[in-house]
Image (cartoon, rainbow, N blue to C red):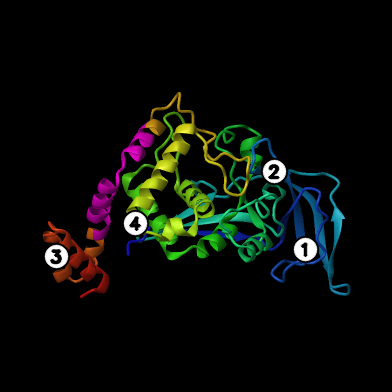
Amino acid sequence: MLPGFGDVDVMYYQSNQLAIPRGHPPPTQLPAEFHNYVGIHEIINSHLPGYVYLKLRYLLTYCPEDEKYNYVEYDEEAYISNRKLGGRDHGPALQTVYTDPLLSLDSVKCERCLSWPPQAADWPTRHRNYDWPDTATVDRVVSNGCDVVRIAHRLCRQHERMGKRQWRLSFSRAEIVLINSWMPVQQIVYHMLRVFMKAKKVTVSDDKTGTKILSNYHIKTLMLWACEMKSRSWWTDDLNLIRTCVELLRTLAVWLSEARCQHYFIHDCNLLDHVDNSLSASPLIVVGEFMSTTETSLCDWFINRYIRQCAQLCPQHIARLFDDVTTSTRLQNTLAAVLTGD
């Protein structure tokens, strides 16, 4: 009932630019939304998995007579800058704040890549014990390709050359398809974890750089791995949302203590490679908080910080029911009233 987001992300790309993996031939056919003249940028791996460079390689020109694109190759290969042309720096996005203080729009410029990237080549075929995602979903994900967004790795952002030229592979299209294939219980758990992390402000910052150690993307990655590695019965048998959240928080605590969070699509990419637990106390504090979270404490938190807020959205006679929830029966009756609006 409560939104788990604070902004709206809109990714957009230009119809006269396209990225292709290194070594791939320039395409002769493109979707209808592309321009008659398209600059082709080749994706070059950097020394960091998931981060790449873009180099101008070809110019495509559409020939109506042949109904295909012809190409010319550039003699000089120029790296494409990731610099932003105005707006407030908000990761790879340009942020626009609306008059509504609860909502802002993050416009993320990217380059479209119609091919599934070689960096994630093993994802479609890796062994999955519980058949999630299924073959049809995997095929749909791969057919959507990926995008490249203009942001350097946080360890490279101050570097004179890499900070201006590094881009990051984005799997947002794939993630949307996968999340839409989740069971309702998985979507609810994801929402609960996001709300908990946001409200508890455990997306802590590194002591030295001030950048976030944990973000919503780590929660998404945690859920993607859990959906693949856990059986359907783990999610549905003896259903207990609080118990599920506690177990997943403890998994996240282990990842953070080991400074290891494997990217869901790129096997050799560590999303916590910037964390050094020997130099910063912040990650260990969060680890302790996650490990000490019990079913009772998390249940109390959701009742008081989530369900009680939901009640405030209901008519006043329902909101007043929360004045006395000292017994399980009264609490159940109050929850039923919140859910039904009666």
Q: Front-most of 181 and 79?
A: 181
Q: Which mark is residue 37?
A: 1
**Which residue is the site of mark 2?**
53
| Closer-to-camera residue (266/32) | 266
Q: Secondary structure at mark 4?
A: loop
In the rendered view, would you say 316 is above or below 93? below
Q: In front here: 169 or 338?
A: 338
Label 3 with label 2: CB-CB less than 8 Å: no
Rendering coords of residue 71 (x, y %): 85, 59
Which tag, 1 or 4, sits closer to the chain's start?
1
Q: CA distance from mark 1 to mark 4?
A: 55 Å
N-terminal of the two: label 4 or label 3? 4
Q: What residue do we see at 19% from left, 66% from top? A: 334
* Res. 334 in view: yes
Q: Amino acid at mark 1?
A: Tyr
Nearer to us: label 1 or label 2: 2
Task: Report helix, strand or loop for mark 2.
Answer: strand
Magenta-colored stretch includes residue 96 = no
Q: What is the magenta segment's predominant secondary structure?
A: helix
The Cα–Cα distance between marks 1 and 3, rounded to whole angstroms, is: 64 Å
Q: Is residue 174 left or right of residue 184?
A: right
Q: Which residue is mark 4?
A: 240
| Gap between marks 1 and 2 measured at Cα | 22 Å
Marks 2 and 4, how far apart at CA = 45 Å
Q: Mark 4: give few (<14), some (14-19) or many (20+) Cα within 10 Å.
A: few
Q: In front: mark 4 or mark 3?
A: 4
Instruction: Tell me the quarter of the image containing the N terminus.
Output: bottom left
Residue 321: give its label.
3
Looking at the image, is 128 positioned above or below residue 207? below
- In the image, what residue type sits under mark 2? Tyr
